[in-house]
Image (cartoon, rainbow, N blue to C red):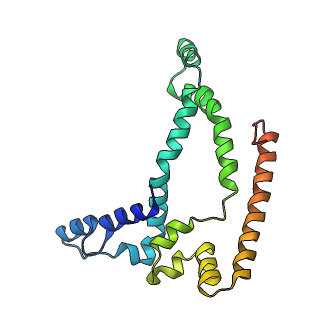
C-alpha cells in the first residue's frame, strides 16, 4: 500500500475538522485536536502508521516460516507433556530463528533510513522540529537548494555505515550459530 493512501486514511481518522477521532472527541464534549500538526503526537503517529502498514508483510513472511516447521515436533512435545509456552520456546522460536536473523540483518542495513516517503508526506511546517529527518533535510538541501554534493556525501555516508552494519550483523549471526546471509 502506498504512503499516500496511508496518509489519506490518517487524515480521514485524525483531521481536526472532519476526522473520525475528533468527531468522537467533540461528541464527548472535548475540543478537537490537530493531531497531524501537533509536536506531541506527530512521532507517535509516524510510528503507529509505519507499524500498521508493515505488519502485513512481516506476518506473511513469518507465517510462511511457521508453515515449514514439522508438525510432528509439536505432536511429540504434547505427548511429552509440553504446554503451549514450552512448544513456543523449544519448537516455534528455533524454527523461525533463521528467518528472524535474515530479516534483522537486512533491516540493519537501512537503520539510518527513517522512511523518507512516509515522513515527507506527513511532514508540515508546524512539525519540522520533531519530524525532520536526515532524508528530508538531504532532499531540501540537494534538490531545492541545488547542493548536490551535500546530498551525495550524506547518502554515501549512510550507505557506508549501513554496509558496515550488515557485515557486522552477518558475522555476529554466524558467531552465535545462525546461518547469516552468506
Q: Is residue 158 above or below residue 84?
A: below
Q: Is residue 158 left or right of residue 115?
A: right
Q: Which residue is at a point 66% across and 65% down the rendered structure image? A: 112
Q: Is residue 38 above or below residue 177?
A: below
Residue found at the far top of this picture = 79
**Residue 47's x, y, as percent?**
49, 62
**Residue 49's x, y, as percent?**
44, 60
Q: Which residue is at a point 37% across and 72% down the rendered structure image? A: 35
Observer-nearest of 124 and 23? 124
Q: Is residue 88 left or right of residue 109?
A: left
Occupied quadrant, residue 149: bottom right
Occupied quadrant, residue 70: top right
Q: Is residue 48 left or right of residue 29?
A: right
Quarter of the picture holding the C terminus: top right
Quarter of the picture holding the N terminus: bottom left
Q: Which residue is at a point 59% across and 82% down the rendered structure image? A: 140
**Residue 48's x, y, as percent?**
45, 59
Q: Which residue is at a point 63% across and 64% down the rendered structure image? A: 113
**Residue 130's x, y, as percent?**
52, 77
Observer-nearest of 38 and 143? 143
Q: Is residue 120 above or below residue 162?
A: below
Amino acid at each position: 500500500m502506498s504512503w499516500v493512501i496511508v496518509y489519506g486514511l490518517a487524515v480521514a481518522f485524525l483531521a481536526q475538522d472532519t476526522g473520525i477521532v475528533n468527531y468522537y472527541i467533540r461528541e464527548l464534549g472535548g475540543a478537537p485536536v490537530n493531531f497531524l500538526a501537533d509536536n506531541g503526537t506527530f512521532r507517535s503517529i509516524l510510528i503507529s502508521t509505519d507499524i500498521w502498514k508493515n505488519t502485513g508483510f512481516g506476518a506473511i513472511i513469518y507465517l510462511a516460516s511457521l508453515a515449514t516447521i514439522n508438525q510432528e515436533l509439536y505432536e511429540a512435545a504434547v505427548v511429552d507433556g509440553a504446554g503451549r509456552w514450552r512448544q513456543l520456546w523449544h519448537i516455534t522460536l528455533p524454527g523461525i530463528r533463521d528467518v528472524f536473523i535474515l530479516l534483522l540483518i537486512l533491516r540493519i542495513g537501512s537503520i539510518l533510513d527513517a522512511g523518507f516517503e512516509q515522513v515527507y508526506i506527513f511532514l508540515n511546517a508546524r512539525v519540522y522540529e520533531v519530524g525532520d529527518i536526515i532524508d528530508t533535510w538531504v532532499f531540501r538541501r540537494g534538490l531545492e537548494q541545488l547542493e548536490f554534493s551535500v546530498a551525495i556525501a550524506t547518502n554515501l555516508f549512510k550507505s557506508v555505515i549501513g554496509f558496515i552494519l550488515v557485515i557486522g550483523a552477518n558475522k555476529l549471526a554466524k558467531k552465535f550459530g545462525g546461518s547469516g546471509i552468506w
